[in-house]
Image (cartoon, rainbow, N blue to C red):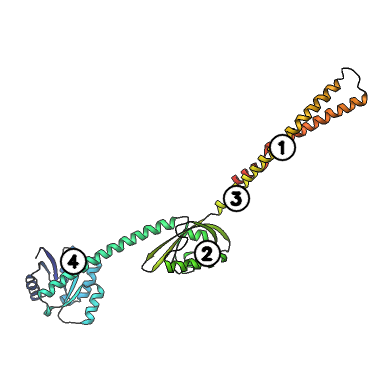
C-alpha cells in the first residue's frame, strides 16, 4: 500500500452517501485515502479554490442543483485535480455531457465497490498528470513557436516555408518587403510564382525529387538565380534551402536574400578595375612613347642650338632660318609630349568611377 494517502474531496449533501463513500474508501487495499467532506455547493467551491486535494468526487444533484455547473466552475477556477461525477442513475447522455465539460469519470453510486472506486481514482489521477504534461508541452511548443516567429519576422531576408508539393505555408515580413506580396496573397500559392518562367520547369522537378526522395538537389548549397517580384520585375537572389520532416511530410525552408545591390557593387568594381587597367596601359604606352620621342628630340634640339651659335660665322641667312625652325619645332614637340604626360596622370575614368560609386 502506498504510504502517502490520496487526498479526496467529496462534495455531497447527503450524510449517508458520505458515510458510504468513506466506508468504501477504507476498504481499498492498495491505497490509503484522506477524505474531506464538503456538504454544500458553497463549501465545495471554497474547498476547490484551496487546491488542496488530489481528486474530487462530485454529487450530480448537490443541493438540488446541477453538478455539471459546479464542474464548469471548478474548471474556470483553474482546478487541476480530476473530477469524478457521482450520480444515482445511469444516463448515457449525462455521461457524455460530463466528459465534454471535463469530468474524468462518471460513476453510479449504488454500483460502487472498493475496487471500482480505487481504480477510477487512480486512472483519473494518471490521466490528469498526462493532461498536465501535455499542457506543459503545448506551452513549451507555443513559447518556442513564438520565439521562432519573433526571430523570423524580424529577419531582413525572406524566409518561406513550403510543403512537398511546393505550396507556400509560411511567409515572413522580409519576404513581403522583398517580393511585394502580403502573407494573405501567397499562402497556398505555388512557390514557382516567385520565379521567372525559365526556372519553373526545373523547380517542379526539384519538388518531384523532394516528394520521392525526401531531399531536394540544392539543399545545403546556396545558389544564385533570378526571382520575380509582384510587379513582374526580375532581380537576382541568393537562395539557401533546407528540408525537414514532420507529421505532414517533408517541408522545405527557403532563405532568400536580395543581392541586387551586391551585384551592382560587383559590376562597378569590375568596371573600375577595367578602367584602372586601361589607364595603366595608357600611361605605360605614353611613357614609352615619350621616352622614345624625347631622347632624339633633345638631341636634335641640342645640335641645332649649337649650330645656331655659328662660331665660324659662315651660316647663310637661309641656313640660319632653317636651324631656328628646327629648334622651335623641337620645343613644340617636347611641350606636346609634356602635355600628354600631364593628361595621363589625371586618369579621368578611374576618378569618375570612384565618384559615381560613392554617390551611388
Q: Which residue is mark 2?
A: 194
Q: Earlier in the sequence, mark 4 or mark 3?
A: 4
Tell me the element at label 4.
Answer: helix
Judging depth in this view, the residue of 64 and 124 nearest the camera is 124
Q: Secondary structure at mark 2?
A: helix
Q: Could you say where residue 105 lies in the image, as x and y percent from the top left?
A: 19, 74
The tag earlier along the polypeptide, 1 or 2, is 2
> In the displayed structure, would residue 13 be above or below residue 314?
below
Secondary structure, mark 1, is helix
| Mark-to-mark CA distance, 4 and 3 | 74 Å
Foreground label between 3 and 2: 3
Going from the N terminus, do you reach mark 4 or mark 2 first? 4
Marked residue nearer the N-terminal end (3 or 2): 2
Examine the rendered structure and indicate whether residue 300 appears above or below residue 272.
Answer: above
Residue at x 46% of width, y 67% of height: 209
Query: Label 3, label 2: how many angstroms apart (C-alpha)?
Result: 25 Å
In this figure, which residue is indicated by the disc labeled 4? Answer: 48
> Of the numbered discs in the image, which one, if any, rests on residue 286?
1
**Percent position (x, y) of residue 273?**
61, 44
How crowded is the residue under tag 4: few (<14 C-alpha within 10 Å), some, or many (20+)? Answer: many
The Cα atoms of the two marked residues, 1 and 2, are separated by 53 Å
Asked which secondary structure carries label 3, the reply is helix
| Residue 300 seen in the current view | yes
Residue located beneath label 3 in the image = 267
Front-most of 184 and 302? 302
Question: Crowding at label 2, few (<14), some or many (≥20) Cα neighbours within 10 Å?
Answer: many
Q: Residues within 10 Å of mark 1 (few under 14, many from 20)?
A: some
Q: CA distance from mark 4 to mark 2?
A: 57 Å
User: Which residue is at a point 21% across and 67% down the rendered structure image?
Assistant: 128
Residue 79 visible to an observer of this rendering: no
Q: Say which mark, if any, is on residue 83.
A: none
Asked whether, in this view, residue 316 is left or right of residue 83, the answer is right
Amino acid at each position: 500500500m502506498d504510504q502517502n494517502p490520496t487526498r479526496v474531496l467529496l462534495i455531497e449533501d447527503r450524510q449517508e452517501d458520505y458515510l458510504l463513500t468513506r466506508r468504501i474508501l477504507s476498504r481499498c487495499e492498495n491505497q490509503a485515502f484522506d477524505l474531506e467532506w464538503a456538504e454544500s455547493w458553497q463549501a465545495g467551491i471554497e474547498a476547490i479554490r484551496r487546491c488542496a486535494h488530489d481528486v474530487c468526487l462530485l454529487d450530480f444533484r448537490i443541493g438540488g442543483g446541477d453538478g455539471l455547473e459546479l464542474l464548469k466552475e471548478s474548471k474556470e477556477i483553474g482546478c487541476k485535480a480530476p473530477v469524478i461525477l457521482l450520480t444515482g442513475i445511469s444516463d448515457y447522455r449525462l455521461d457524455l455531457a460530463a466528459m465534454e465539460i471535463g469530468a474524468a469519470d462518471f460513476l453510479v453510486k449504488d454500483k460502487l465497490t472498493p475496487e471500482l472506486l480505487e481504480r477510477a481514482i487512480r486512472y483519473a489521477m494518471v490521466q490528469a498528470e498526462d493532461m498536465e504534461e501535455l499542457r506543459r508541452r503545448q506551452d513549451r511548443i507555443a513559447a518556442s513557436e513564438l520565439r521562432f516567429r519573433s526571430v523570423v519576422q524580424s529577419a531582413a531576408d525572406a524566409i518561406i516555408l513550403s510543403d512537398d508539393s511546393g505550396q507556400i505555408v509560411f511567409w515572413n515580413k522580409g519576404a513581403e518587403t522583398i517580393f511585394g506580396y502580403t502573407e494573405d496573397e501567397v499562402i497556398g500559392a505555388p512557390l514557382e510564382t516567385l520565379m521567372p518562367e525559365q526556372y519553373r520547369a526545373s523547380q517542379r522537378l526539384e519538388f518531384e525529387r523532394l516528394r520521392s526522395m525526401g531531399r531536394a538537389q540544392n539543399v545545403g548549397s546556396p545558389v544564385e538565380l533570378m526571382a520575380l517580384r509582384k510587379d513582374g520585375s526580375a532581380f537576382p537572389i541568393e537562395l539557401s534551402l533546407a528540408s525537414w520532416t514532420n507529421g505532414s511530410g517533408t517541408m522545405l525552408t527557403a532563405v532568400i536574400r536580395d543581392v541586387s545591390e551586391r551585384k551592382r557593387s560587383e559590376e562597378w568594381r569590375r568596371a573600375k578595375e577595367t578602367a584602372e587597367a586601361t589607364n595603366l596601359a595608357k600611361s605605360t604606352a605614353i611613357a614609352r612613347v615619350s621616352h622614345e620621342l624625347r631622347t632624339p628630340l633633345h638631341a636634335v634640339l641640342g645640335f641645332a642650338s649649337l649650330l645656331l651659335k655659328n662660331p665660324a660665322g659662315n651660316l647663310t641667312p637661309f641656313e640660319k632660318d632653317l636651324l631656328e625652325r628646327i629648334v622651335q619645332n623641337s620645343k613644340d614637340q617636347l611641350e606636346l609630349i609634356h602635355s600628354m604626360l600631364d593628361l595621363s596622370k589625371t586618369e579621368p575614368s578611374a576618378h569618375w568611377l570612384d565618384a559615381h560609386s560613392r554617390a551611388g
